[in-house]
Amino acid sequence: MLVLFVVFRFVPVVGAFLLSLTDYRLNGQWSFIAVDNYSRLLGDKLFHESLLVTLTYALIFVPLTVLLSLGAALLLHQVVWSRGFFRGVFFLPYVTSIVLAAVLWKWIYNAEDGLLNGALGLLSIGPYDFLGKAGTVLPSIAVTSAWKGFGYSMLILLAGLQAVPKSYLEAAMIDGAGRWQRFRYITLPQLRPILFFVLVIETIGAFQVFDAMYVMTAGGPVRASYSLVYFLYDSGFKFFDFGYASAIGLVLFLIVLVVSLIQRRLVGRDD
């Protein structure tokens, strides 16, 4: 396992860092330029815009997914009959293709004949172009991604709920604690390590968003859904500026690391 980790994790990270210090082109020619790519990145307006889009998306997607996962886990935890069936139904979107999910939700959001606008039309509302407006495109994509991926976090949280000692809850009930008090003072503290893990993996997923934006909006409208990974993709595979793309990837890694450390301090610390 150590060899596999070094070969497929550590070596590529080191290689990406070294590549970010060069001006490497598709024809194989390269020159060492030290930190010029990073200096260029800090002054790149497109980098600032894509970073803002990514942060905004993360602020929408992560709380939405965590709350959806926790709510579904709490519901399944209360279900006794056919729990396995409902667990499979909730988990099913996770194992589907993100491209398939994006195409499906792109039709749902369609302003002309989409399912959502059809439902709103029954209420004499709309039609509304959810993916064509800068104010709604990120929430719309976040809903799609949350629907697609909440099943994985739901199963993790469900396992955490089932591991909470029943004796704690029974003692609280004897002392007169209500359902909300039992959840707040017993269940939630017991779930803290699990919640920390879920927050970290969902945050990483939010900062790596690309597929849904590529399929549903192609970064539009007017780069309102142009994420950091989309910026990295264009730099590396559209303009073949591999050194610059590697610098974007390293900066993205550092941003996720800092955010994860903040989450560790706020959520994952032990009292």
Image (cartoon, grey):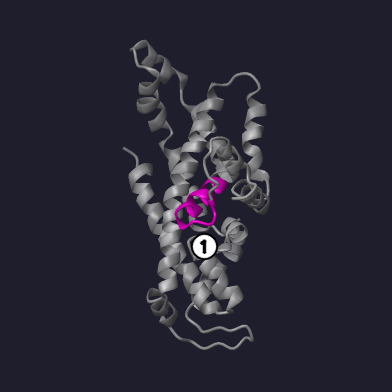
- Write down the quadrant of residue 92 in the picture: top right
Q: What stretch is highlighted in magenta?
A: 129-145
Q: Residue under circle 1?
A: 221
Up the image or down, 76 lies above or below 147; here it is above
Q: What element carries label 1?
A: loop
Residue 9, compared with residue 169, is above or below; it is: below
x, y (%) of residue 122? 58, 35
The verdict on residue 196 being magenta is no
Going by the numbered disc 1, the residue's amino acid type is Pro
The structure residue drawn at horizontal position 48% and vertical position 87%, both measured from the top left corner, is 32
Q: Residue at x 65, y 47 (%)?
A: 113
> Count of labels shown?
1
The location of residue 222, given as percent across then percent down, is 49, 66
Residue 250 location, x and y as percent?
47, 68
238 and 193: which is toward the camera: 238
In the image, is residue 179 above or below residue 53?
Answer: above
- For mark 1, does the 10 Å Cα neighbourhood hold few (<14), some (14 to 19), or many (20 or more) residues? some
